[in-house]
Amino acid sequence: MYSYLVTGAAGFIGANYLKHILKKHDNITVAVLDKLTYAGNLGTIAGEIKDPRVTFYKGDIGNEELVSHIFLTHGITHVVNFAAESHVDRSIENPQIFLETNILGTQTLLECAVHAWKTGRDGQGYPTYRTGVKFLQVSTDEVYGSLAQTYPEGRDHEEFGTIFGADFFTEDTPLDPHSPYSASKASADLLVQSYADTFHLPVNITRCSNNYGPCHFPEKLIPLMIKNVLEGKKLPVYGDGRNVRDWLYVEDHARAIDLVVQKGRPGEVYNVGGHNEAQNITIVKLIISTVARLMEENPAYQQVLTTDHAHINESLITFVQDRLGHDARYAIDPAKIKKELGWYPETSFEVGIEKTIRWYLENQKWVREVVSGDYQHYYESMY
Ligand code: NAD
Ligand code: TDX
């Protein structure tokens, strides 16, 4: 049996990963540690925390006493650290909490890992660890900074699969973060690497492109646009809408992390992405047309709308002031994880975005709950 500590599993990607590993592996127990910030919702993993293999702890990854207690109580063999403040716009407004959680919180997990797993020292004085130990840091492509867009001006492409520049982020691309969020994630990555170099802690870092899919908090581009379309609200597109992101369906990311945990070479970084670049404006237009089509195909969906379905059209798009320091283009080269671990994305964007929109249409209760303070207070009173 292996004993996992999964942090941040009440959030978007952590929840999808938790669901994946519980289905896939019957030789694990999982301690979940989540602070239940505005972005973390126990309802998202309500079924999973009833599983006898799962123990839920409400708390901060920066709480050394609590983290040590979890390591000792469960004999943790694997840590998968999703817990983070994750929204770039919030990091521009209030960077402090990003440094506390993303940097200091990660350092607390690393420190507890070094102490809890140490079995002795080798001939050179480095700690030796119990077999099976692994620390996986879930990082992001944003630590690499921004790539140039060389697609010819005035020839914006509306098709998916368009490549908007000659360069891609590889694992050797130097770190060059631009936002307080990405600077905090890059700092955490360097700390993780330092614990590998200094203490020989067996670590991996994954750096993934933009995720989308079910249970995504409706402040990020895709879930916000879906929510606003259904409510007939304006769709705020930053700047000229031509910034490029590389999108990956969240279940493909969950599979990639699982593979790295199982088979990743200690000390290695793995980039995760699906060569699915698109300009933001293309994504927004696709969401509008897909919602309109689904409404026509299945009139029952129209009950979800708080607007007349005739109002679902591109006139909702509003260009607003650009994000400060807005990165122009992200694009991942996933060659290493494909070659070493045999990972590849299974979900095309066209399929993934329709699945995602259907999920939001069918889970409006979840959306109402996650944006309601009452829901948070309810769970606060339970844990
Ligand atoms: P999210 O904001 O949806 O969820 C974060 C979770 O962490 C929440 O459940 C929250 O309650 C919890 N949390 C926050 N602070 C905590 C603390 N101090 N202690 C314990 N728990 C805490 O984030 P997400 O989109 O699921 O991202 C998960 C991870 O993946 C993050 O580390 C993020 O940097 C990384 N990542 C995200 C994307 C993306 O597109 N969303 C892409 C690449 C990497
Ligand atoms: O209302 C919006 N309008 C808009 O034009 C929002 C919320 C975003 N945008 C633009 C900004 C970006 O170019 O859409 C793009 C995507 O924005 P976000 O969804 O905020 O994602 P991004 O800033 O790219 O960061 C995401 O991917 C990497 C996650 O939030 C990070 O946690 C992850 O590390």
Image: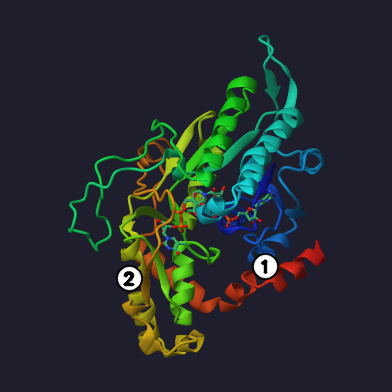
Q: Can you give x and y, in whole percent of width and height, for residue 284 in the image?
A: 36, 68
The number of numbered badges drawn on the structure is 2
The quadrant the N terminus occupies is top right
Q: Can you give x and y, in whole percent of width and height, for residue 234 in the image?
A: 42, 76
Q: Secondary structure at mark 1?
A: helix
Residue positioned 43% across, 40% down in the render: 271
Foreground: 305 or 266? 305
Eyeballing the image, is 247 above or below 314? Answer: above
- Which residue is tagged 2? 285
Residue positioned 67% across, 33% down in the render: 110
Q: Can you give x and y, in whole percent of width and height, for residue 134 in the image?
A: 62, 34
Q: Can you give x and y, in whole percent of width and height, for residue 140 in the image?
A: 48, 44
The quadrant the C terminus occupies is bottom right
Residue positioned 50% across, 43% down in the render: 182
Eyeballing the image, is 264 above or below 121? Answer: below
Eyeballing the image, is 375 above or below 176? Answer: below
Amino acid tagged 1: Gly
Residue 27 in sight from this viewpoint? no
Query: Which numbered tag is attached to residue 180?
Result: none
Taking the image as shown, residue 315 lies to the left or right of residue 227, namely left
Amino acid tagged 2: Lys
Q: How far is disc 1 from disc 2 in space, using C-alphas?
A: 31 Å
Nearer-N-terminus badge (1/2): 1
Query: Which numbered tag is attached to residue 43?
Result: 1
Judged by depth in the image, the label closer to the viewer, 1 or 2, is: 2
